Amino acid sequence: MPTAVQHGSAVIVDGNTFQRKLLRSVLRTSGFIRVAEFDKLEFGLDEAKRTFPNFLFLDYNTASSSELLRGRPDISKTYLGEATYLIFIMENPTRYRVTSAIAHGAHWIISRPFSTNALNARIRAVMNPDHLDTNAPVARSLKDNQAQQAARIANRDLDPVSLTSITSSSRPIQQDDFFENDMFDDYDEIFQRRTASGQSEKEKTKAEADAFLI
């Protein structure tokens, strides 16, 4: 069993009460001593600016319904302190949604359903200085490579992804980065089945993107 996070703090923004409470329970079990939760993006950002938490966990659908995201601002740079990491949580993480989250300043993306072990691993990858020191490309990319990686993903013909680090390396992103990742193998089979559906899945993704832009 993983050791508990020491003195962790987080803000959760999710319009779905059940999902919000579930994530809060997971964080509490993981050792977070301060967890605030809100159902609107504006309130969550105000709390994050006031308390400087380690993490802001942001539900993608909740964020998408907010007027603050008009004009595609970088939330991390505009609203959050340097010590606060933005993690988007989303269902059906298509290429469009992933690139949109990156544009909004995401440090990581987690797809639902997620496992407690996968979430804890991602939290520790950010909070453990020794881990980041021994993985310099990760540390550098958290600050420097988000826009570059977003452009790379947008120009590639990628199918929906499961659970992925957005900025895990300075090299060009490959399809293998999204599939067969040993940290997230719980969901690989599900999304590989979606990939096998071929053109119908691509049409669905395009329809979602068009609806998002309306």
Image (cartoon, rainbow, N blue to C red):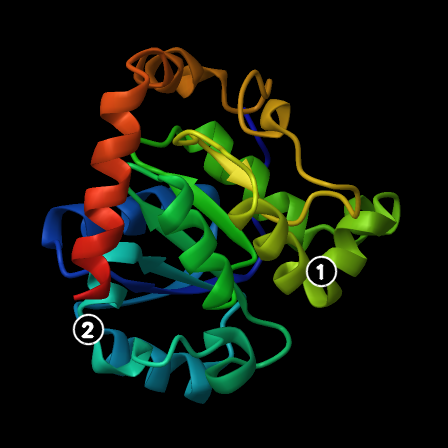
For the point 38% across and 48% down, the residue is: 96
Residue 59 x %, y %:
29, 56
Compared to residue 196, the image places residue 166 above or below, namely below
Residue labelled with disc 1: 145
Residue 83 - label? none
For the point 54% across and 24% down, the residue is: 1
Q: Is residue 4 visible?
A: no
Name the foreground residue: 192 vs 52.
192
Compared to residue 197, the image places residue 37 above or below, namely below
Residue 147 x %, y %:
62, 64
* Three-letter residue code for mark 1: Asn
Q: Quick one: label 2 or label 1, which is nearer the N terminus?
A: 2
Q: Is residue 68 left or right of residue 53?
A: left
Residue labelled with disc 2: 40
- Mark 1 surroundings: few (<14), some (14-19) or many (≥20) residues within 10 A: some
Q: Is residue 149 left or right of residue 156?
A: right
State if disc 1 and disc 2 touch (CB < 8 Å).
no
Which image quadrant for residue 4? Answer: top right
For the point 26% across and 74% down, the residue is: 41
Residue 46 x %, y %:
34, 86
Q: Is residue 191 left or right of residue 13?
A: right
Q: What secondary structure is found at the residue carrying circle 1?
A: loop
Name the foreground residue: 47 vs 180.
180
Q: Quadrant of the C terminus?
A: bottom left
* Three-letter residue code for mark 2: Lys
Residue 154 x %, y %:
52, 49
Name the foreground residue: 121 vs 155.
155
